[in-house]
Image (spheres, grey):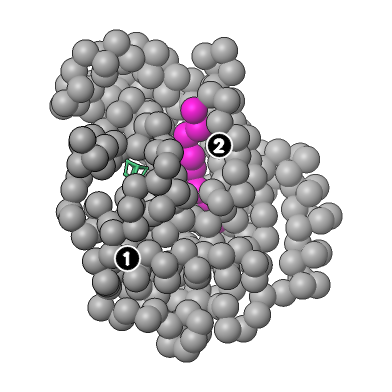
């Protein structure tokens, strides 16, 4: 998931990095300038998670009002369940290699994580009907991730035969997985979790599960932008590259594609607009209203559309 293919590597080296070096990032949009405008949050006592800043599912951002002001918990659906299991599976496999534990049994993991998720679902029949398909989908991604990690370790060992095991693992798999970072300097949650940060190549990865026929829209880059600015505010080093990893399916078969990009001024500016707008909703308890058309698998459908009746 977090390894670039040949084309992506060429695109990174031949186009994205040279252009990023030429254009650069404005100093005031670097996270370490969190105490000055425009990064300084207008409402310093409010906090929102980065996923709500980036999310564009609700056209009026009422999801922010409903979850943060009214305190409503969304209703889980099959899409969210599948996405969450994919995240956990990839995290589990990559960490088992990073931590030098080695190959794990998918069946044992599924029994612990997958079956439990479905058992605890409050949408029993719908969840059970999907369980078999979700299991086989997640298993394919699990195997693919495991093969990639094994391949990277073998390639590193054979090219550097005198490297220690620690060096082999740290350089073949240079990943901080589910890296926890404090985003409070920017008005974000103190418990942000970055899907993966590749510390040798400086890439922030965000994993997304897309429904069939969904497209990789540009706003999905906002999540990486938020994490980049938050990481800069804490570590004070530049974070210039983002990559959204899309897991989807064609005819039931998993597909993986990556959107690799420079986290430049435009994206940072867009993220700031979203952060300010959404912090204002929370601080002023401002209901932005129900849009003409709601996102069809929105977690808050029952709550919002129930109110309309
Ligand atoms: S149900 Fe509609 S208004 Fe409510 S959060 Fe979802 S998309 Fe927004």
- The residue located at (78%, 49%) in the rendering is 11
Residue 239 locus on image (x, y percent): 58, 68
Picture layout, residue 33 above or below residue 167: below
Q: Secondary structure at mark 1?
A: helix
| Residue 158 location, quadrant | top right
Q: Secondary structure at mark 2?
A: strand
Q: Main secondary structure of the magenta part?
A: strand
Quadrant assignment for ligand 1: top left
Which residue carries the number 1 mark?
Answer: 281
For the record, the magenta segment spans 204-211
Outermost residue on the front side: it is: 309
User: 278 and 7: which one is in front?
Assistant: 278
Which sits earlier in the primary sequence, circle 2 or circle 1? 2
Q: Is residue 266 visible?
A: yes
Horizontally, is 243 left or right of 303 in the view? right
Looking at the image, which residue is at 43% across and 87% down?
35
The percent position of residue 246, horizontal first and vertical second, equals 55, 37
Which residue corresponds to mark 2? 246
Quadrant including the C terminus:
top left
């Amino acid at each position: 998931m977090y390894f670039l293919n040949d084309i992506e590597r060429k695109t990174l080296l031949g186009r994205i990095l040279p252009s990023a070096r030429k254009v650069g990032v404005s100093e005031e949009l670097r996270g370490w300038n969190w105490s000055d405008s425009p990064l300084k949050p207008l409402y310093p006592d409010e906090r929102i998670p980065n996923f709500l800043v980036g999310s564009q599912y609700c056209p009026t951002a009422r999801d922010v009002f409903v979850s943060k002001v009214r305190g409503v918990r969304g209703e889980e659906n099959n899409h969210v369940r599948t996405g969450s299991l994919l995240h956990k599976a990839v995290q589990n496999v990559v960490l088992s290699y990073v931590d030098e534990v080695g190959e794990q049994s998918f069946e044992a993991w599924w029994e612990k994580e997958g079956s439990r998720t479905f058992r605890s679902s409050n949408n029993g029949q719908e969840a059970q009907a999907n369980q078999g398909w979700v299991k086989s989908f997640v298993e394919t991604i699990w195997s693919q991730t495991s093969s990639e990690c094994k391949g990277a370790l073998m390639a590193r060992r054979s090219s550097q035969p005198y490297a220690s095991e620690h060096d082999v693992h740290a350089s073949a798999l240079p990943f901080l997985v589910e890296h926890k970072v404090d985003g409070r300097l920017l008005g974000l949650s103190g418990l942000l979790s970055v899907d993966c940060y590749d510390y040798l190549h400086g890439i922030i990865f965000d994993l997304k599960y897309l429904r069939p026929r969904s497209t990789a829209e540009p706003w999905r880059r906002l999540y990486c932008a938020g994490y980049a600015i938050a990481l800069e505010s804490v570590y004070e080093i530049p974070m210039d590259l983002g990559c959204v990893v899309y897991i989807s399916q064609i005819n039931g078969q998993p597909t993986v594609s990556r959107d690799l990009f420079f986290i430049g001024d435009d994206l940072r500016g867009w993220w700031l607009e979203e952060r300010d707008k959404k912090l204002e909703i929370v601080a002023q308890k401002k209901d932005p209203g129900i849009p003409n058309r709601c996102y069809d698998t929105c977690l808050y459908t029952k709550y919002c559309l129930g109110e309309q009746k």
